[in-house]
Amino acid sequence: MSDLTKLTIAEARDALRKGDTTSVELTEACLTAIEGADALGAFVHKTPEIAMDRAQAADERIKAGDAPAMCGIPVGIKDLFCTEGVASQAASKILEGFKPQYESTVSGQLKDAGAVMLGKLNMDEFAMGSSNETSVYGNAVNPWRAEGSAEALTPGGSSGGSASAVAADLCLAATGTDTGGSIRQPAAFTGIVGLKPTYGRCSRWGIVAFASSLDQAGPMTKTVRDAAIMGQAMMGHDPKDSTSADRAVPDFEAMLTGDIRGKVIGIPTEYRMDGMPAEIEALWEKGAEMLQDAGAELRQISLPHTKYALPAYYVIAPAEASSNLARYDGVRFGYRAKLDQGDGITEMYEKTRAEGFGAEVKRRVMVGTYVLSAGFYDAYYNRARKVRALIKRDFDMVFAEGVDAILTPATPSAAFELGQSFDDPVQMYLNDVFTVTVNLAGLPGISVPAGLDAKGLPLGLQLIGRPWEEGDLLNTAYALENAAGFVAKPGKWW
């Protein structure tokens, strides 16, 4: 078969079962594509030996007739997931040389299902960023280019390497994590599908923590069907994670009928923001019409506390990060600064953290430490927690009134140029304006590519579902995907 790397998971699974190709051939094709794509900066730790070993084992398993859906499928793993014996740095200098002797639950489940790990993928340092420009490895680059321009674009963040690798057909799918939109925003910027499951669906064990009450792993794939297949393999209860939900994971792929007749789709008035590009507004309206034409009922809804979501998120997330990142001090693992004669333990901590963390991580740790400090805890952190409860209540009330899913834009713009200076960090944080509410409320959300802007760059729409109803959400996304008919691919320049 030609163009093996362009296959979807579903197509590759069927081809493997029929004997039209082998996992070894698929894996070799992906490894060749990766070797020729260093300009994208997507893969930062390549693991060809592991990949070939797993591909050979997958082929044996398929021949024996004992093969789950993900068996033999080559995937990339975000550098936030601990992988046994393989560098797992969270794109930070402070974890330089760290090779865990254990496997994260999610990557372990994919391994057990027979998926083939091609390597580790670039990301923003400790998942803090919206453009993949805070990585110790350097920028990940979007495979798309604006028409008539050779300027490098961001693939989004923090899962920028995952998005770039999938969009450029370097792997058939990739893992991502989403704390405030880090799966959905990069997916929208690169024309792929990104699913953020309900908080607690995927185990967080073995994933380097950013903000523990917000982080959630999910699949980044070429199609909604692929998100259903890979998502099911990643989800499930894990007794090692106290926040993991003990709920059965249904067969999501079997739920993809595309029939959404009678479903109620909420259109929130608060997501119409001042200065939103006309193209985003038009795509949103077109997406609503597509769902209506497919038999869904549209309903205007109100989520009144949405306007407070971004400031609440940027209090809660840094607060949790400052606590989680306190463990990185150069004592037991990772980078340790060179000390001068006479330096003690305090100087070692200070120098190691000063040299090991990047500017954005330091900024968020300092903000988080400030909002948790005596005198400011109630004024900032506790108030943000109360706002979070109100945001969740808004969604609960809307769903209780019969809304099945909510349609919004995924991002406030198409991918922007790398190196674009923002005078104020808050300008960068605004990239998460449509996505953070989903994390604050612990809901499932999915970004589906739905069109191109005037410069030929992909734009995505976001669907937000009821908690634990990923199957229903995926089916609505499947209907939207079918109606949008998005098939555009980036032209190869790398």
Image (cartoon, rainbow, N blue to C red):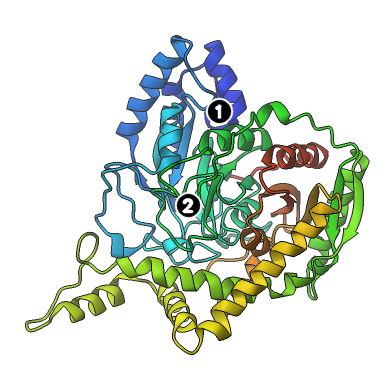
Q: CA distance from mark 1 to mark 2?
A: 19 Å
Q: Is residue 412 visible?
A: no
Instruction: Indicate left or right for 414 with 157 as reference.
Output: right
Q: In the rendered structure, which amino acid carries the disc numbered 1?
A: Asp
Label number found at residue 3:
1
Q: Residues within 10 Å of mark 2 (few under 14, many from 20)?
A: many
- Earlier in the chain: of badge 1 and badge 2, it is 1
Vertical side of 172 occupied by 412: above or below:
below
The image's mark for residue 350 is none
- Residue furthest to the bottom in view is 375
Badge 2 element: helix
Can you identify the residue that label 2 sits on? 40
Residue 60: give x, y in percent of width and height: 39, 14
The N terminus sits in image quarter: top right
User: Disc 1, disc 2: CB below 8 Å?
Assistant: no
Q: Please determine whether, in this image, residue 5 is positioned above or below residue 481.
A: above
**Which is nearer the eye, 303 or 427?**
303
Image location (x, y in percent) of residue 158: 51, 59
Q: List x then y, in percent, for residue 364.
A: 46, 75
